[in-house]
Amino acid sequence: MFQKGLKDVVAVHTKIASVDGEKGELRYRGELVDKIVSNATFEQLSTYLWTGTKEPVSLLLKEGRELPEHVSKLLLNLPINLQVMDVLKVAVSAYGTPSFLQKSQYEQSVILTAALPVIVAFYYRRQQDLEPLASQENLGHTANFLYLLTGISPTPAQVEALETYLLLTMEHGLNASTFAARVTISTESDIPSAIVSALGTMKGPLHGGAPSGVLALLDEMKSPEGVRPVIEEKLARGERIMGFGHRIYKTEDPRSIVLREKCLSLQGKDAWLDLATYAEKEIIHLLNEHKPGRKLYTNVEFYAAAIMRAINLDPTLFTPTFSVARIVGWTAHAMEQAEDNTIFRPQSVYIGKTFV
Ligand code: ACO
């Protein structure tokens, strides 16, 4: 049976998370994500996804915050005009030393999860002509990331907004980047390689690259009057509207609902956010008019863009920040795959010419 894009094909059994696209429910190990995020930290929820227990691995997460010397040197020697996603691939690859690969898959996963925000901030500051900063012992994973980017202790509201986003996007079943990680580990390759595969997959605009497209879209619309003409023109050209549609959700993405509320409580009155909330409703209406029956709603990326804008993250950091969250899902799935492995090797059907 051929299913383009493996649509509706079940490729793994997992105990990590479930997504019900009809009901609009996402559960981490059986618990509804919108409930679980309200009183959990990055440290707690990542451990829960990795191990099923809520004991935070803060110690190991802190240990990984210090980059190995060869990784820092590498970051200092890379060209200054790379995309941060490409820098992450290079830096994560450089962790594949024999001594690192001797550690357990779990330890490697935690260390790389700790390292990702440090790498992002190190290179981003270099691009701004700023010195890298040392992690703050007393700060949690999310607050430390914000501190490393700006050099300023973030406000509790900023930390809460970013942490909510990170917790909501840590894991989402067999999405494209997680699938890439599982395929890589299924060849008995290693954790850094699985993460590199996932990073390359995350980068594309149909997956993790969408939030900066959402900002560009709203910039193009400029005002409520601009929504209809911009959307109609894009649809007439056959373009996708960034931040809308989802392979699994055929109703509102539960993560968007939480992020929308968080944005509204964080930002208060803001012309951009007013436009975003107006545009959301109008775009759903237009998509329904132009693409009837496709059930296209806002996906997590629409309000992810709004949250990251509200805490003043540079748009070049949107997809890297998504990766700072999703590395937890990638590594949890890589370890689950390795536990009961069969190499992924689907079939293809040759439809070209045949010569005798
Ligand atoms: N804008 C316009 N039309 C759309 C959109 C969209 N955002 N999404 C789907 N459609 C249309 C398609 O054109 C297609 O129409 P057709 O029947 O006339 O050909 C129909 O809806 C079904 O689309 P598919 O491509 O079959 O849906 P699929 O499940 O493969 O795509 C995807 C899902 C890639 C997310 C898609 O909705 C999309 O491109 N969205 C925009 C990019 C985006 O926001 N990505 C972030 C996703 S969330 C995440 O990765 C974390």
Image (cartoon, rainbow, N blue to C red):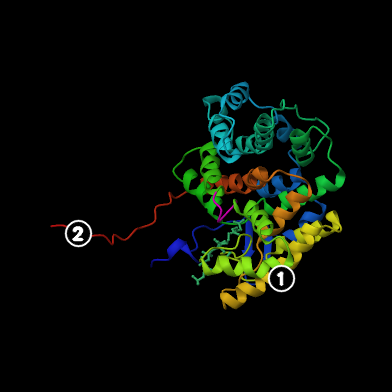
Taking the magenta stretch, the answer to whether it contains residue 206 is: yes
**Relative to residue 3, is residue 138 drawn left or right?**
right
Residue ID for mark 2: 354
Name the element at disc 1: helix
Q: Main secondary structure of the magenta part?
A: loop
Q: Nearest the camera: 123 or 55?
A: 123
* Front: mark 2 or 1: 1
Tell me which numbered mark, 2 or 1, is placed earlier along the sequence: 1
Amino acid type assigned to the residue bearing label 1 in the image? Lys
In the displayed structure, would residue 270 be above or below residue 150?
Answer: below
Q: Residue at x 59, y 51 (%)?
A: 209
Q: Residue at x 68, y 53 (%)?
A: 169
How far is the residue under mark 2 from the one under mark 1?
A: 51 Å
Stretch in magenta = 204-208
Q: Quadrant of the C terminus?
A: bottom left
Q: Quadrant of residue 191?
A: top right
Quarter for ligand 1?
bottom right
Q: Quadrant of residue 14?
A: bottom right
Q: Nearest the camera: 308 or 199?
A: 308
Residue ID for mark 1: 281
